Image (spheres, rainbow, N blue to C red):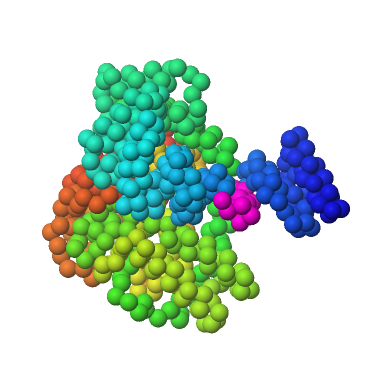
Amino acid sequence: MAGAHNSDAAVHRAFELHRTGRSREAATCLVATIKEHPASPSVFRLLADVQRSLGRRDAEAAALAELTSLDPLDAPTWRRLASVYTEDGRVEDAYKAYQHACQLNPSEPVALEGLCSSALSTQRFARAEEAKEQLLGRFSDRAGSHLLAGHIQKAQGNSEQARAAYQRALALQASSSEALFNLVDLAVPAQDDPLTLRVEKLLASGNLADTDSANLNFALARILEAAKEYDNAFAHYERANAAILRVMDGKGIRYQPTEAEAWLARNVATYPSSTFRRPLEPLPIDLRLIFIVGMPRSGTSIIEQILSSHPRVAGGGELTIATDCELFYRQHRKELGLAGAVDPDDERERDLLREVRERYVDGIFERDLDPECVTDKLPGNFARLGFIRTLFPDAVIVHCRRDPIATCWSLFTANFALHDPYYNSLEHLAHYYGCYQRLMAHWRRVLSPAVIDIRYEDLVCSPEREIRRLLDHTALDWDDRCMNFHLNRRPVLTASHSQVRTPIYKTSLERWRPFESRLDPLSGLAGD
């Protein structure tokens, strides 16, 4: 009983420390208490609150995961854990947590909306459709149900149905900035259009949450850019990005150039040329993987659309399987006492790599991606090419390149949800792009077989020549459907959802030019 009394006293002290703004001390106190005494759910719940106030998402998630172990029937905890996973980009874990929350409380609309959204993010389109139908059938009075219906229709290229869903969301929630932005994104209206006036009126109303400010400023910036009012457009792009920075900062998501440099150095040190001297044996099944990587907005979506138009290829979309596998690999490598450069000559390392590769392939099959070739188009996989080449020595890796300023400007003007925090500052974009270039230079030196480079500008100016070159590199025979990729009806979730359903055009090549005088932070970037 004395131990329990001491535990209660420690928790009370931690609560008071947290309440008075001394959250770091509160966290230290709670961690020490957990080590000394069997912890109750209330201890981990308080620890999760404390870690969140400190912006420590990983620690918050760990506390909530422990809480679900202690109280696995608590639906709100599962839902909160799923939300934290979503913020941290762990969409696969978020999907599984939302599944638990919905199973425990099927009548909770927020959890069902989260399940639908995470199913979309993990390319589980059938499950997203199922969740959408449940939302519309049981919660048709919620704007969120119709927003998700609009997102699904938009991904499928059904613009009219998407527009109707967003209009229905607006009818239920007149101030829905998300619905307004997506309507503008589907078709940019004129400046005197009622939709434009509605955006302007909401922006002028004041007292907007930062997420609403971001959506509305991005929408108005698009409208002004289309009207060639470039000064005003740039001002609204800046306001939109500033609002998103505030949102992410409040969640502890910040870009730190020193951390980016350390990440780059670790990657180079972990995967030197020696790692690739004794590759794993080829996959024992008839499956060829094509990884499409590069900076976001560099043409990865159109390359996947071209390849997935071939009858022998299935488009996987922006799969997060490699991200999850790499996290699993790092954790288990540490448990095995392995450190430093990856060494496949060490049988412990080799066995672990085989296990991780099986996990990746299982993830592919779980999504019903089982033709001869499958694409994995997560642009950020450029950061884990050493890991990918170690697992799959015979995989095809396509690296998409685009003019650096065009790429960075496209990112600055794109309205993403929570994402890597370098997108919203021209200075941070310039720094991160430099890290990306240095890392790709390292991969070119050490990876074998080498990556295939496709330049967006070459593709746009000479599409047939570049598509033939792409198919040759991927050992695919010519098929006219690859030239007519815009007729491909597969769902596309990226910001390029409309471009991939349109024949190739050149207008995006120089889109940044009218803003050139405002892009000084990007002026030092050079093509690679």
Residue at 47% across, 54% down = 96
Most common SS among magenta residues:
helix
| Quarter of the figure with residue 336 | bottom right
| Picture mark count | 0
Residue at 56% across, 51% down = 73
Residue 398 lies in the magenta stretch? no
User: Measured from the top left, where is residue 385 in percent x and y?
Assistant: 43, 64
Please, which residue is most extreme toward the right here?
A: 2
Q: Is residue 264 left or right of residue 513?
A: right
| Quarter of the figure with residue 134 | top left
Residue at 43% across, 71% down = 357
Region of the chain picked out in magenta, as a range: 57-73
Q: Quadrant of the C terminus?
A: bottom left
Please tell me whether residue 92 is drawn above or below residue 312 in the rendered image. Answer: above
Residue 65 lies in the magenta stretch? yes
Please tell me whether residue 136 is drawn above or below residue 216 in the rendered image. Answer: below
